[in-house]
Image: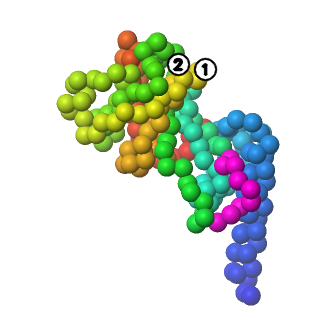
Amino acid sequence: MNLQENVKEVRKKQAEKTDRALLDFLKKKPGALSLYQLAQEIGWSIGRVQKSVERLLKKGLVTYRRAFLGGRSLKLIIPIKMGADLQPSSILRKPSDVEIAIPADMVDGECWSENAFLYALDRTSLGISSRRERKWHESSLFEAKVPVRKEENAVIARIPEKVSRFYLLHMSSYEVSASPKGNKVIISVGGSSFTR
């Protein structure tokens, strides 16, 4: 084995050790944490955490959930429950849907029930409404009824796989703006990096 192969092997082993440590930490921690929170709690750099999360995402060992807090889109990392550790991605099914969190203080909780209407308005905008919107229905590229659930601080809408793929929601940040009545929101999709 030459020097380059030795270096590659050492880096691979270090990456595996980092991934195992991060996955163990995530399994012991209840809930979901952002990249920044993970880096703070483990004492690693953001870059080290981000690279490890990217590898674990590819292997299907973690997933994430979007949250919107204080004007920022957060990617919250969650371990996927399984028996064996660090299995190859070819035998794992990756999550296909993305959830969008709409802050509870932006919407009228009384308007929202178990389902909402999702509209693909243009290349960078989605509309989500608690009821069918005639104007959006007539002008949107795609419409679907999507499941919604209420949490303490947010209304969570599950976005179908083909929509989340088209808008690259699995790797894009988004901003939420709401109507004054609180019965509909516009999701502006943009950027393609992890955010703190």
On screen, residue 184 versus residue 149, left or right, reads: left
Magenta-drawn stretch contains 104? no
Q: Amino acid at mark 1?
A: Glu
Residue 160 x/y as whole percent: 42, 43
Q: Residues within 10 Å of mark 2 (few under 14, many from 20)?
A: some
Task: Please report the residue visible at 64 percent of the width from the left and 43 percent of the height from the top.
Answer: 77
Q: Amino acid at mark 2?
A: Ala
Task: Please report the residue visible at 47 percent of the width from the left and 25 percent of the height from the top.
Answer: 114
Q: Secondary structure at mark 1?
A: loop
On screen, residue 69 versus residue 137, left or right, reads: right
Q: Are marks 2 and 1 in contact (CB under 8 Å)?
A: yes
Residue extending farthest to the bottom is 1
On screen, residue 115 versus residue 104, left or right, reads: left
> Which of the numbered marks, if any, corresponds to residue 104?
2
Residue pointed to by mark 1: 152
Q: Is residue 142 visible?
A: yes
Which secondary structure type mostly characterizes the magenta part of the structure? loop
Task: Please report the residue visible at 55 percent of the width from the left and 45 percent of the height from the top.
Answer: 194
Q: Quadrant of residue 88?
A: bottom right
Answer above or below: position of 129 versus 162: above
Q: CA distance from mark 2 to mark 1?
A: 7 Å
Q: Secondary structure at mark 2?
A: helix
> Which of the numbered marks, if any, corresponds to residue 89?
none
Residue 136 x/y as whole percent: 25, 28
Residue span colored magenta: 79-88
On screen, residue 27 versus residue 115, left or right, reads: right
Residue 95 x/y as whole percent: 54, 50
Q: Quadrant of residue 9?
A: bottom right
